[in-house]
Amino acid sequence: MLKFQTQNPKSKITLFLLGVVTTFITALPIHAAEKLYLSYGPLMFSLRVESLETFAKDGTINEDLNFYLAQVTPEQRAEFRKLLVKRFDINPVMVSRFFNSAIGDDILTRLGKGITIQGGANGKYVLRGALIQAAFDPEGLTLLNVLKKLSTNLQLQGELMLASAKFADKVLLATETLTTELRSLTVQEAATDASVNYSTLPDVTKPGKYAVTKRVWNLVDKSRNRAFYVDVYQPQGQESEKTPVIVFSHGLSSRPEDYAQGLQNLATYGYVVVAPQHPGSDIIWLKEMFEGYHRDIFDLNEFINRPKDISYVIDELQRRNQGEFQGKLDLDNVGMAGHSFGGYTTLAIGGAEIDFNNLQQDCNRLYEGLDISLLLECRALELPRQSYHFRDSRVKAVFAANPVNRSIYGPQGLGKISIPIVFASGSYDPAAPPALEQAASFTWLTSPNKYWIMVEGQAHVNFTKLDPGINEAIESVGHLTLPSQNLISKYASAVLVPFFEVYISKNESYRPYLQSAYAEYLSQNNQFKLDFISATSANKLANSIEKFKREH
């Protein structure tokens, strides 16, 4: 798991005080929960926590537990027993601080509607206390230890829990249906595409012809008192009169360097690529949050500051153009790309506008189930309710990868994007599931030059950049096979390069790559496919979405 070392006196004092307070709290003689209750309508069932503890210890099934396990297979009983004592080795300070953040509190509030104090009051505070105490306890964070740390009896609201389970099943089914539909639409479009022998064309999945140098700028936007750095990738030996520019926005709790391979690859095709740090929502902020300097995972004002960072960087390029770049930068035709929260940023620069009414409506429905992207988007409800216009007219085409967008923009907000656009998704994405975050959004886009790609098996992030502990956890999940990062990068380059060549560099020779037939060509002999559809398939996709809604 992520582990951060505190290096300064203030952090050490904070951790010491937290440890003293926690030790004091856990030593207090509190009344522990004796029973869990399950209610469904007028029916009420109970289960003693002690029975679960006995079962976990030696497999003994007491009478009250037998009521629940009588129809369960021996294999399922064994799995349940393992689940009760499975330990999650997470830094307890991180657990405490996460569940005291706005998003952590929101998760507990929503869980607490279905897991209530006996009688029906929201159980969030009891859950939070049990989770934190279990994390600090020598036995560690296990399901059984959390139950043992409950300070009072809890009641599981059967109707709400069943609704949440149905929501999760519906999302899984929607994802499977969407994946099948995109595969079908890709095949259909490919059958009508102009015939191209791609084996005779340049391979855009490989680097271009230019060598690249990297520099780092340290900028200060005095109007916002905001300091941040920018990674700048510059092609060498370019002879054309105009040099195209691409700006990139990183995801939540990441940094520009995490995307270095893809950014450098773009630069080998003759683009100056610039990637600013977003200091209120990057990995540094997250580390500081877990060290006690911030309460939340990201600064609320990032919804505003991120797009402004992009425009400020383009302004900076204009200031430096005549000197450092000999006036060659084409800053009237800038391309932009972004990932996740950077996808939100990209769409904002492209013209999308926050629709607070749509967001409020969707956030009110969040109790149906846990949607990570929506939790992030709902934080924007804390912003002043006014019109925000971040469109930068110098940007002429946008590429949004795994974008967080559906609820915060809605049909009206996304409908304001008129420039060429690509959505990129991953079929295994748990953070911004395509069925929730991109499917309907693609049909709402009004730009005639719109494309959607989905990489089968892509799961939102580049796992090679994660802490080894997370990789081990992923690899321990049975029957889970993910595509290699090399294949994902190859698929991304196959669309990124032609898209910006056509719509930023005005190079029509790359248009044959922007069709489903090329995705089919690349997918040959690969277990994980690349799906690609254009505006041509938007109505069919919309009809498929409506059919799914009616039937489910």
Image (cartoon, grey):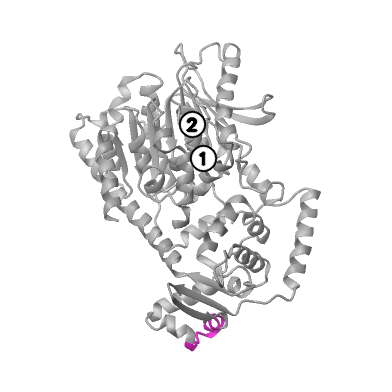
Please tell me whether residue 492 is drawn above or below residue 3 in the rendered image.
above
Quadrant of the rendered image containing residue 231: top right
Q: For this view, does 168 lie left or right of residue 464?
A: left
Residue 44 visible at all:
yes
Q: Amino acid at mark 2?
A: Ala
Q: Amino acid at mark 1?
A: Phe
Secondary structure category for the residue under label 2: helix
**Camera-side residue: 509 or 403?**
403
Mark 1 surroundings: few (<14), some (14-19) or many (≥20) residues within 10 A: many
Q: Which mark is drawn over residue 348?
A: 2
Q: Position of residue 362 (x, y in %)?
A: 45, 47
Q: Secondary structure at mark 1?
A: helix
Q: Is residue 303 above or below residue 267?
A: below
Q: Tag 2: Cα neighbours inside 10 Å, few (<14), some, or many (≥20)? A: many
Q: Does the magenta portion include 135?
A: no
- Look at mark 1 in the image and give the residue it sits on: 341
Q: Is residue 525 visible?
A: no
Task: From the viewer's side, name the closer residue of 354 and 424.
Answer: 354
The stretch of residues the image draws in magenta is 51-63
The answer to if 59 sits in the magenta stretch is yes
Q: Position of residue 280 (x, y in %)?
A: 63, 39
- List x then y, in percent, for residue 370: 47, 55
